[in-house]
Amino acid sequence: MSVKHVLTTCPYCGTGCNLFLTVADGRAVGVIPCKTDETSQGQLCIKGYNAHAFVHHPDRLTHPLIRKGEQLTQAGWDEALQKTVDEIKRLVAEHGPDSIMVLASAKCTNEENYIFQKLARAAIGTNNIDHCARLCHASTVAGLLQSFGSGAMTNTIPEFEDADCLLVTGSNTLEAHPLIGARMLKAMEKGAKVIVVDPRDTPLSRIATISMRQKPGTDVAWINGMINVIISEDLYDHDFVAERTSGFEELRELVKSYTPERVEEISGVPKQHLVDAARIYATADKAMIAYAMGITQHSNGTNLVRTLANLAMVTGNVGKESTGVNPLRGQCNVQGACDAGALPNLYPGYQGVEDAEVRAKFEKAWNGELQAHKGMTLTCAFNQAFTGEVKGMVIFGENPMMSDPDIGHIEAAIQKLEFLAVIDIFPTETAKLADVVLPAACYAEKDGTFTSTDRAIRVVRKAVDPPGEARPDWRIACELGRMLGNDGFEFDSPADIMNELAAVAPIYGGIDYERIDRENVRWPCPSKDHPGTKVLHAGSFKIGKGVFAIVEHTPPMEETDEDFPFILTTGRNLFHFHTGSMTRRSVKLQRESPEPYVEICSEDARQLDVLEGQSVRVSSRRGSITLAARVTDWIRPGTIFIPFHYAEAAANRLTNNALDPIAQIPEFKVCAASVEKA
Amino acid sequence: MSSATPNAQSQEKAEGDDFEPKIIVFCCNWCSYAGADLAGVSRLQMPPHFRVIRVMCSARVDPEFVLRAFQKGVDGVLVAGCHPADCHYIGGNYRTRRRIALLRMLIQQFGFDPDRLRLEWISAGEGEKFQKTMVSFTKTIEEIGPSPMGGGD
Amino acid sequence: MRIAFEEMKADRLLTARTEHGNVAPVLLARGDEPGELRTDVPYQMANILLRVVPYLGSDKIAVVARRCDEKAIAEMSKRGLLDSGKISLIGLACDAEQVSECRCSDPCPSKVHIGECVKASPTDKVVEDLLAKSISERLEFWTAQFRKCNKCFGCTSNCPVCFCDECLLEEKTFTPEKGIPPGFAFHLIRSIHLADKCVECGECERACPADIPLLALRKMVNRDVKELFGFVSGDGETTSPLLTTLDGDSMEGDNDVC
């Protein structure tokens, strides 16, 4: 008998904390923080401390399952894989490769995502590959790519500590990214001013220097308003604007009408707060913007991200330490899944599929012809499944039956599919509808890498064996690729896959396993002797000059009316993670937050005669759910909040699938809803 | 910048004549509860601001009961038990004594007036002592003022 | 370091070493390749020991232990959680830097095998400052500190003397599941529970992502316990004053605390 401590990366948010899994007799029994880790510094959040808790849960999938009539019945690997391959081949033959959609996973490693997209592109022959970044930061990738030329966090996590001003919006950092929040607290201790803009009071906003509660869906207005103040009070960085940006005069014209008075009218942010916030942000030596879903999950998400980029550029807060525009990515490897090319329009390393030169390079590397047009996004794929154009789906480690907007619609779309294969670790809501279910290994049971939100490539190390017959996703995908007749899937280990990824994606060019085993490297890292990059856009932007976007305020797609008088916004809480398939199977986390609830402000609750803990029915135009009321003063009157972790009252039954026209990200953060006593 | 700090929470509550202290009294079943009963039966006049919780022994009062009461916004906590050497369970009240002494130190470190917590020995026959204790404790709490926790969490 | 196996005849050695560019706690068996052993990173070895012991049967274990680990192990043995006969301590004297970080008043293990003892830190500035505050200033201070709490349970998970099977802090009666921050009772319940066992290792403070000066709070409570009962935790013999009554020796102060 022995006990070992295996250094690995936390499977929850994108912060990328390293931790030790305590393994005794082949079981993960506990977690010890890693004191020398640059990111976590020996500290973790409650989810990190419970990262071992779901690994050996009895619900884990242990055998392949095949649908026989109504039932999913146990099958052998050969049979299940063969059935999957046969169905894919049949659909490709009958309807062409674009009738298949492959969903990759931000919970899988870089290597696995590379294999998933290769499976779609090289083996099946379609660019229809996407993953849940579509639901979280697709607008960041698109927006920052247009403004700066690179769609990732411009700075790094440790830099938060040294900023003089932090502008945090649409991010409940202390709950959703606790260890990044910890850095913010350290900055505050050192005297940094913190401005939080959020319709809810969050643990951070309660201790912030300025907290502004805007009406959901009015973010362009207050950001333009801040720029208005900065320009009219001549607080902008003249040199930076002149040397490194283009389009400033148009921006100056645009923001003229966004006076603090008008912004207050639109967004409800008191004008004095706006003016103060603008002054603090503009006059700080080093100011960082951090944002998350509250900015991106809007029908104008891409433009919103660009507006934030405007704000940073106007004040010259880009390209230096402790500045920049910093999207906080929510999944352990959502950054890496994007990097590895699990996007319908981009090959690994953000290289466009429609660029002939790039395509030629990949055709050579993968030894076969590739599709010349962009593939379908995740959100689009479900619409097309509903209308019958998409016939088959292969879903690796995602749970759209919980995570996507308007679940009723998703369910109907899935019912229309001719074939659905789900590869997952738990029998998720989506897996229950599948024709073939394959059991996968979780993070503790395989080797690989995750890329954290600040572009650091973090190592995931195998600690225990997968349960039953479960296999790592990369092996499953490689097997499918081989069986589909492609010879590019002969990999022995994730290290081999990383070598191929490094060879085709220049930003990962200098990455190899020997190096990252010891070193915390951040991309872009084009060669073995390159130290990696902490601050993006130092000196110049990838696209030359930064581009100011001209964006007017537009109301959200769905506004309140008499029948649906409340604005519903959704999000995470501290104790659970996304669709809850892992955290709700962790005893301690489940204890901390066992039931679904809706936050409603005390004034509204009084009018509806609803008391704390009472059951209420929340409805939107798409459905209704019943859950407990949590009466609080931490939310704006007229706005309600539901965490989306709970299958028994899934917030996404209600949300709107209105899409951002550029990034096709759904508007999770605003829809009209009604509340009544149940 | 402090002018623009909407989060600066005022924990002050209206003080003065209209302050009605909320007081929790833990009474041991064998002595103090009977003492309280006697005070009532004897129609002794007492301030009306306290609620009695009967426990089998004053040692049943875990420190967390007291802390929870303070967290919920009570203004004072009184623990009443049998006189030394009279404990129905032989040594319960000795433990209580040490525990409450420590607890008083602890709440003082946190920033609560230690006099918000009091331990008193009241036997079954001491109805009058119960009444006097309540009068003086209520007066003490009124002097200290409302709990800084306001309405509690 | 091999002395652990030869001199102490241990079957296992719990220490820390370089792994993957980091420092990791490691449990070595006789004959294992030791690698680069490290003593400069303060992993809470007593806590780790308590977690690994259930899996090691009758093996004898040597632990590289600082003074605080030693005291924590004594508290554990006293409560029957460890069989002290199975544990050998390799005394590690903290260096000056470590001592000043912990503001440690008792840095020297009873038997030193590694390093040299340095002088104890005479005072704890954080504690002194707090004691100088008025009662309302203290309230303000702690309220602001506790408001940052993110309920990670890092202070309990890493604490060597936090070993109840059922934790009251995970019980909804006392810490309702209302998100964060958990309220001051969370921290004070912990304080009172540790009052007769805290060895001032400072791990709670180091593990706190919100930088709440928890070590200072622990030290203040320990001072009170010492003042009231003359009790100092960390030895294997003296029973906690919160558990004793008049049977056995009466403790000083029994007659005047109330």
Image (cartoon, rainbow, N blue to C red):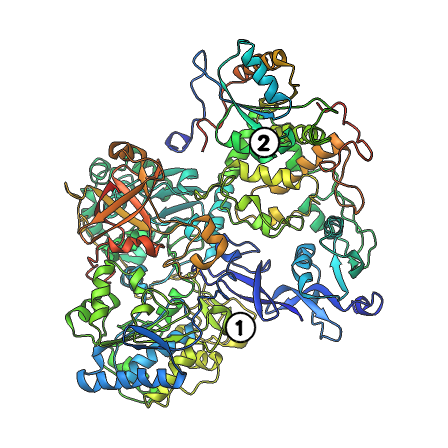
Nearest the viewer among A581 and A461 is A581
Amino acid type indicated by mark 2: Phe
Q: Is residue B16 left or right of residue B143?
A: left
> Is residue A190 positioned above or below C69 on the image?
above
> Is residue A436 positioned above or below A301 on the image?
below
Amino acid type indicated by mark 1: Lys
Secondary structure of residue under mark 2: helix
> Is residue A129 positioned above or below B61 on the image?
below
Residue picked out by circle 1: A462
Identify the residue shown where x is 22% and y is 72%. Answer: A376
| Label 1 crowd (10 A; few <14 / some 14-19 / many >=20) | some
Q: Which mark is residue B110?
A: 2
Find residue A124 and report its image quarter. bottom left
Q: Considering the image in quadrants, where does the C terminus of chain A appear?
A: top left
Chain letter of the residue carrying label 1: A
Q: Is residue A4 left or right of residue A447?
A: right
Can see residue A158? no
Q: Is residue A330 left or right of residue C238?
A: left
Nearest the viewer among B115 and A636 is B115
Q: Considering the image in quadrants, where does the N terminus of chain A appear?
A: bottom right
Nearest the viewer among C229 and A678 is A678
Chain letter of the residue carrying label 2: B
Secondary structure of residue under mark 1: loop
Can see residue B73? yes
Give the CA distance from mark 1 to mark 2: 45 Å
Find residue C123 and report its image quarter. top right
Give percent across and percent down for residue A362. Answer: 32, 83
Give percent across and percent down for residue B62. Answer: 61, 35
Give percent across and percent down for residue A171. Answer: 36, 50
